[in-house]
Image (cartoon, rainbow, N blue to C red):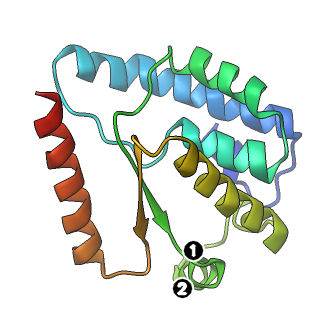
């Protein structure tokens, strides 16, 4: 599924893209996340369903309500306890992508206005759920960001125990 989704030459409808991502997430929840949670382990993901709202909702302009229903179905109503949004200017993001030693994928090749909508989508998701989403300045040093994330996680763990 991943190869279909990131193929730089691939084309698919917005709906097919959404459903493939959701199918992948459903498998992730079934095979990895739920078993880990059942064992009492902490699960860390680099993206979860906020990404669907940002990319397919704001970026692709699909209805947010329908996407949330699909998200909740695919994720079996699981929601992250804490989310970190590394907010960076588009220019910095594009520079980082260009600095990688690999071919850009289908999403990375989208036009600037798409990426602007996605970034704004992430900010709106964060603003709508300020208790869960912590916005960090993604231009800061990696070690500093790691320390902020570690502090945020430990603080959240302490408050839930």
Residue 19 appears in the rendering? no
115 left or right, relative to 49: right
Of tags 2 and 1, the one toward the viewer is 2
Residue 3, given in percent of the width and then of the height, sits at 65, 46
Residue 145, given in percent of the width and then of the height, sits at 29, 70
Secondary element at tag 1: loop
Q: Is residue 97 above or below residue 12?
A: below
Quadrant that contains the C terminus: top left
Residue marked by disc 1: 102
Crowding at dot 2, Cα within 10 Å, few <14 / some 14-19 / many 20+, comes out as: few
Crowding at dot 1, Cα within 10 Å, few <14 / some 14-19 / many 20+, comes out as: few
Residue 1, given in percent of the width and then of the height, sits at 64, 36
Q: Is residue 93 above or below residue 74?
A: below
* x 19%, y 67%: residue: 147
* x 39%, y 20%: residue: 31
Residue marked by disc 2: 99
* x 57%, y 83%: residue: 92
Residue 144, located in which quarter of the rendered image?
Answer: bottom left
Q: Is residue 108 above or below residue 97?
A: above
137 left or right, relative to 37: right
**Residue 70 versus residue 103: which sits nearer the camera?**
70
């Amino acid at each position: 599924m991943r190869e279909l989704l990131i193929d730089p030459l691939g084309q698919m409808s917005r709906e097919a893209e959404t459903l493939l991502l959701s199918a992948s997430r459903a498998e992730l929840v079934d095979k990895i996340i739920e078993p880990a949670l059942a064992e009492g382990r902490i699960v860390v993901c680099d993206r979860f369903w906020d990404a669907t709202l940002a990319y397919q909702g704001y970026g692709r302009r699909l209805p947010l309500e329908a996407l949330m229903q699909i998200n909740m179905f695919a994720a079996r109503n699981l929601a992250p306890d804490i989310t970190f949004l590394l907010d960076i200017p588009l220019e910095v993001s594009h520079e980082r992508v260009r600095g990688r030693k690999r071919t850009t994928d289908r999403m990375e090749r989208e036009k600037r206005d798409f990426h602007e909508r996605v970034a704004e989508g992430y900010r709106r998701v964060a603003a709508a759920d300020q208790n869960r989403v912590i916005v960090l300045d993604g231009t800061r040093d990696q070690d500093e960001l790691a320390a902020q994330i570690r502090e945020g996680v430990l603080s959240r763990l302490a408050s839930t125990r």
